[in-house]
Every structure is written in C-alpha cells, then in structure tokens.
Amino acid sequence: MDPVIELDGLEVRFGQRVILKKLKAALTGRSVGLLGPNGAGKSTLINTLLGFHKPSAGTARILGRDVRTQAREVRSLVGYMPENDAYISSMTGVHMVRMMAELAGLPREHAIERAHEAFFYVGLGEVRYRAIGTYSLGMKQAAKLAQAIAHGPKVLFLDEPTNGLDPPARTRMIQLIQEIRDRGDLHILLSSHLLHDVEDCCDQVLILKDGNVAAFCNLEEERRANRRFLELETRGGNNGDFLAAVVKLGCETAPGVQGRIKLVMPEGLDVRQLYEIAAGQNVQIRRLNHKRDSLEDIFLKAMENPDGRL
Amino acid sequence: MAVYKKTYRPYEGELTPSWSRFLVIPRYAFEELHGKRFLTIFFLASFIYPLICALIIYVQHNASALSLLGVQQGARNLISINVTFFMSLLGWQSMLALFMASFIGPGLVSPDLSNNALSLYLARPFSRVEYVIGKMSVLAILMSLMTWIPGLLCFGLQGYLEGWQWMRDNARLASGVFFGAWVWILVLALLALALSAWVKWKPAAGGLMFGVFFVGSAFGAVINGVQRTRWGNLFNIGHLIGVVWVQLFEGSKQTTNGAVFFRAAQDEVLPLWTCWAALCVLGLICLYMLARKIRGAEVVR
C-alpha cells in the first residue's frame, strides 16, 4: 500500500535546537495517531508537513507530494484543524468557513453550500450566523473542524481536537472523527497526548519522544495479536499440575504471584476447557480476564529510558 | 427536515485559478467595511474635492456658465487647469487616503494575528505573499478610487473639453497622477500592514500611521534646525513624496515644489535619488516587518 505520509530522514531545526531528528516512517493507515509527551515534536511535525517550517534535512511526502518542493499541492490536499484557538472574530461562523473554502479554491457558490453543510455536520447549524468570537470553546473546536473539512480535503490534520472539551463535547468530537474515518473518503492524522482519543480513532500510531520516533505500531494488528491473551486468578489445588495440564493443551503460560497466571491460548481452544481442567485439578478460577496490551502499555514502553525509568 | 445534508462528502468539483484567490480577501473585507457607517460616509465625502474640480473644468469650458457667473471670456484662466491643479487634487486626495488607511489598515492584519487565524489562511494553497497582496489590495483598491481614478477622470474631462492636442501636450500630467498616486498608495499600504502586524491595539496602530507622517516631519525639521542641514527631510515622508511627484509630473522642467501637504521647501530639496532610496528603504523595512510576523506558526527558538 502506498504511504499516505512518508517521513524520509526529516530533520527540523529551530536555530541550534534540533526539534525533529531524522524521522523515518511510512504511515499507511486510514487514521494515524501522533502521540507523544509535550515537546516531543508533534505539532512541529504537522507544521512542517504543512510547509510552515522548512526541513533542515530530509523531506516528507504526503500522498506522494514532496512537502519541500510541492508545498502548494500538498496544502491543496490537506485540511488542518490547529491546536490553538484560530478564527476571525468579526465574522460569523459560516462566513469564515465559506471564506476559507474559497481560499482553498472552491468557487463562491460551492463554498457557500459546503460551508453550510459543514456547519450542520459538526452540529453548529443553529449558530452558524453568530459571530465566531462569541462561541464557546466547544463550538470553536467544532467550527475549526468545519473549516478543515469544508473544502473536501484528502488528508485531515487534527491537532489536539478534544483540547478543553467537556465530556459530552469530547464524545461528540470523537464520534465525528470516527464517522469521517469510517466513510473512507480521507485519511486522518490525529495528534494528541490523550491516549483514549487516539485509541478510539486510529488504526496506526506513531509515538514521538524528544524528536525521535519512539514507536510505530499498527493498533489493529496489536489488537488481533492480543485477542487470545488471558489473565487468570486461581485458588486451591496444585497450581503446578494445573499449569502443566494447560501447557499440554498448547498454551503459553507465565505464572505470577498469588495464583495469578498469564496465558496465551492457541487457535481453536475454548475457555471452557480451562474450567474443565481446573475442576479436574481441584483449582478454582476466581477471575478470568481477556487482556491485551493497551495503548497505554505501548506508550509507556516507548517512553521508557534505557535504565527502565520514564 | 434539514435543508443541508448532515454528512461529510469529498469535493470533486472545479477549482478557481490559483492566481485569483488573493482577491477573496478584499471581497470579504469590503463586505465588512460596507457595514461601517462612518467609513462609508467618509469614503463618499472624499469625492467632494474631485467633484468640485470636475465642476471647475466644466465651467471653464462653458461660456454660458461663465457669463452667468459674470466672468469675461478672457478671465477663463482664472483657475488654470495645469500641473498645480492636478497636483493639488492629488495632494488633497492623498491626505484623505492617509486618513482612510489609518482607519482601515490597523484592522487588517492584527485581528488575524491575535486570533491565530494565519494558520488557517496559510494551511491552504495560499502563500504568505498572496496573503500580504490580498490585504494590501483592500487598501490599494480604496485608495485608487480616492486618488488616481478621480484624477484621471478629471484629466479625461479636461482633455475631452479642451481637445486632443491638449491631452497630447499634457500626457505627463496623467502619468504623474497615476504613478504619483501609486507611489503613495504602496508606501501607505505597506506601512499600514506592517504597523498592523506589530501593533495589536488598533487605535495605537492608527495613531502610529499619523505619527510616522507628522512626527516624522517634525523630527526631520528639528534635525534640519539643529544641524543646519537639509538631510533631516529624509524622515519627512511628505517631503520625499513631494520631490518624487514633482519629478513625475514635470520631469526636469520644474515649475512647482510639490503639492499641498507634500511640499518641499525650495532651499531644502533633497536630491531625487535620495528620496527614491529613502522610500525604497521604508518599503523594505515594512516588508521585513511583515515577513517576521506573517507566518503559519510562531517559531520559539
């Protein structure tokens, strides 16, 4: 599959400070999460992809277009929802979105139509004629999303889209992003430091740390790989015999303290068989959880220093 | 049922040519300015002087009007339609343009900067240069309507009434009005945008526009007085523009020393090239100030 975003030794410096250090990655997912602690370089990466910062070495490509030499073409493919408040306070919401669509190249009549559509889509239909400076924070976030999608981009950059939102507004924003993703018309690059947002919306994750790629994983594959991973808590009987019997069934096991066992079951094995073996060995299974490495585990692993500290 | 579809759909339609997109900015700006009553009245009032000029030209060529006014045919040249007439027209109109630029200019860039709207503009296939040209064109269009367009209309009226020969003999007046106005428009527009980009408080930015013009000339006069020199006029934009206008209107056969508000005292006239150089330096400083501020993202080094 052709990468949506390809980072080819991308380096960005501000003066003497190296912000992005020779990043290399090929992002192919429908929706890619960009994770990292504050100052990791997430926003700088997005700004560089938009052509706001010039790479000091290497380059990046979006849908095959080089951000160094084809910046204008790149920007014609992209919709951008910035992290901070960004609006024209004297304009009404729909007026601003219409102007932005026209600046992206839409003829006036199409821009009007799509600005209204985008406003209804993000749930601001009723307030579209109000000055955008009077909007609440949640409304401003939604208006930013509206201006990012009004011109029908191929790639959507969302920089901290749920920043400052209350739980219902956050849920609504996540639903909108999921809807846009599931329609399959465009690719999403979502930058956030909120793991849940990324987990809910993305199928690939690029984790940055100090300007380096700390981890790059496909969440879908991780989810599939961890589907048969169980955590048991047992009581009574001889745990050793139980473990030996489970291994005979083809399970990989890792005993823990206080009767806890982690095991990966082979394909075709049913959980019921574990209960039958346990009953035969006079072992009680007090708790059984289907576990998978959460994004939090992946993130924390990526953030670990060589000495094991965070 | 909602009129609009509540769904996302990609756009597959035609696009406007990229060269024309900067014109979106003045179109929206004019829609906004149209709602401001004071500016609309001021703009309309700025046509009073050109209308009076047109009336003078008409009356000068209308024998019955002259006899009604009791003026003999020989006194037709009571007000001569010559270089002073057109330079005065340009001088008055240019001063009104300064007021207009002071009212409108500060609101062009500073709101975009204070509300981070630049990242929205520049995340589109729309460059920083196009942004600046778009914002400049708001001022350039308005100031053109106030300066060289009425000037050329008056020239056309005079030429129509006086005859083709007059137009040919005085073609330099038309080019002087046109190019002289554009020099002033470019200086004003760049200055207004640069101050708007650096001074976020609109009244302060508007005040600074006047400051650069009037305080600059006062500062120049002080330097001239203290140092017994004429080089203080380098800080006097009115002087610089006046010298350039005289050159544009009259070439080497100079009979005037500038226009109202843009006059150079006879014994203090700076060499023409220094005036051009000073205006270019001012323009470059403004461009540098704009380049520092007009960015999609602020860089913290």
Image: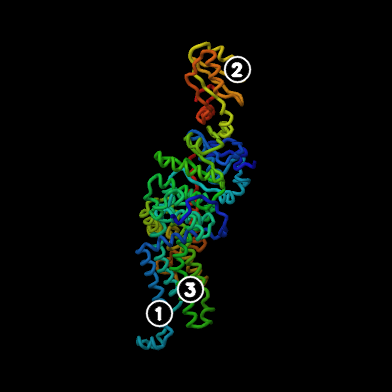
Q: CA distance from mark 3 to mark 2?
A: 97 Å
Residue A113, visible in the rendered structure: yes
The residue indicated by pointer 1 is: B56
Residue type pointed to by label 1? Ile
**Which mark is in front, 1 or 2?**
2
Q: Nearer the viewer, residue B75 or B95?
A: B95
Marks 1/2 same chain = no
The residue indicated by pointer 2 is: A247
Rate crowding at label 3 as few (under 14), some (14 to 19) or many (20 or more) other CA atoms within 10 Å: some
Q: Secondary structure at mark 1?
A: helix
Scheme by which the image is coloured: rainbow
Any mark on residue B152, and which?
3
Residue type pointed to by label 3? Leu
Marks 1/3 same chain = yes
Vertical placement of residue A205 versus A104, above or below: above
Chain ID at mark 2: A
Vertical placement of residue B255 versus B143, above or below: below
What is the quadrant of residue A167 in the picture? Answer: top left
**Which mark is in front, 3 or 2?**
2
Residue type pointed to by label 2? Val
Marks 1 & 2, CB-CB < 8 Å contact: no
Rate crowding at label 2 as few (under 14), some (14 to 19) or many (20 or more) other CA atoms within 10 Å: some
Could you say where residue B224 lies in the image, as x and y percent from the top left?
40, 58
Marks 3/2 same chain = no
Q: Residue at x 61, y 49 (%)?
A: A70
Could you say where residue A300 lies in the image, as x and y percent from the top left?
51, 28
